[in-house]
Amino acid sequence: MKPFGKPAIDIPAQLELLKHRGLIIQDEDRARCFLEAVSFFRLTPYMRPFQQTDDADHRFKPSTRLHALTRLYDFDRRLRLLVMDAIERIEVAARAVISNHMGPKYGAHWYLQPRNFQRDYRHQALLDSIRAKQEKALQDYQRECSRIDASLASEDRKSQLKSLRAKESYARHYALTYNDPDLMPGWAAMEEITLGELSHLFKGLARDADKKAIARRLNLPGPLLQSWLHTLTTIRNICAHHARLWNRELGIRPELPKTVNFPWPQHLQKPGQHARLFTVLCILNLLMRQVSPHTSWDRRLRELLSEFTEINLPAMGFPLDWQNDPFWQAPG
């Protein structure tokens, strides 16, 4: 351990530091604009592939240009957007399949019943989370009503505005309309919780038969859906914080199918670590075909990779012949 002694430096000093480390900057005005929009700290992980290995001064490899870094950054940004688009659709579908199975089988407020969950599931934390969201929705409504009351509108107009505000979210509507049970029904609650909470909820369901029935709606085995929801939660959080994605090693490694009775890439049927992003992209591609059969997501991924041909695909876990695999050639 030692005291921190690095100074904060302005953008001209940042440019000088990059040049001192050997980075070629051809247009300093554009470079300055880029560092105004993307901080030096955020750009640092994108520098590493271009820096000399084990160099304490972080010097760049000969002939490295700033343009190469900004290209890599732009690729990663667009990759995150593409991944988030898929996760959004899959997340919405996961909420739906859980709600559509559990509601009709166990009732509108099925999630209130502890017997529907395993003993070690943090059931009270789920209820507290939903209650907090419902109470916040009510508090927001009450603040809006106070502003409406303070306005110069007529009483009829104030009443109309309050009625409109009450309908802006179901959480508000339920809290203002019903008192038993005190929390909203399952189909609304499933839309309020986070993807992480949804993943834990699915894992915590008491009956394997329910997990299997829910996963079957996505043509998956139950254990795979459980694992993949966990992995996608992690990936979503990376994307939501605009963090580096392209060559990241997976901290939460998804379970892979032991036997294959659905389209699946040949590369992932072979032994290996499979700890890079390629595995996640395969999962997203498979699930997108389930939830959006006419999807063009795989085509958009191929187009992105074709536009950035300099990207190191093996660093993402791609096999050399990945495009020849029938899994990626299915019509999209």
Image (tube, grey):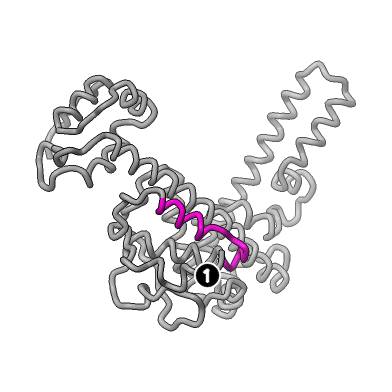
The amino acid pointed to by label 1 is Ala
Q: Is residue 197 shown left or right of residue 64?
A: right
In the rendered view, would you say 239 is above or below 67? Answer: below
Identify the residue shown where x is 60% and y is 64%.
Answer: 291
Residue placed furthest toward the top: 152
Q: Label 1: which residue? A: 330
Q: Position of residue 312 (x, y in %)?
A: 29, 54
Q: Position of residue 239 (x, y in %)?
A: 44, 48
- Numbered disc 1: secondary structure: loop
Question: In which quarter of the view is residue 28 placed?
Answer: top left
Identify the residue shown where x is 25% and y is 19%.
Answer: 12
Identify the residue shown where x is 12% and y is 40%.
Answer: 1
Q: Position of residue 282 (x, y in %)?
A: 44, 65
Query: Can you see residue 115?
Result: no
Predominant SS along the magenta part: helix
Residue 295 drawn in magenta? yes
Q: Is residue 125 shown left or right of residue 12?
A: right
What span is in magenta?
289-306
Residue 17 drawn in magenta? no
Q: Nearer the viewer, residue 279 or 28?
A: 28
In the rendered view, would you say 5 is above or below 84? Answer: above
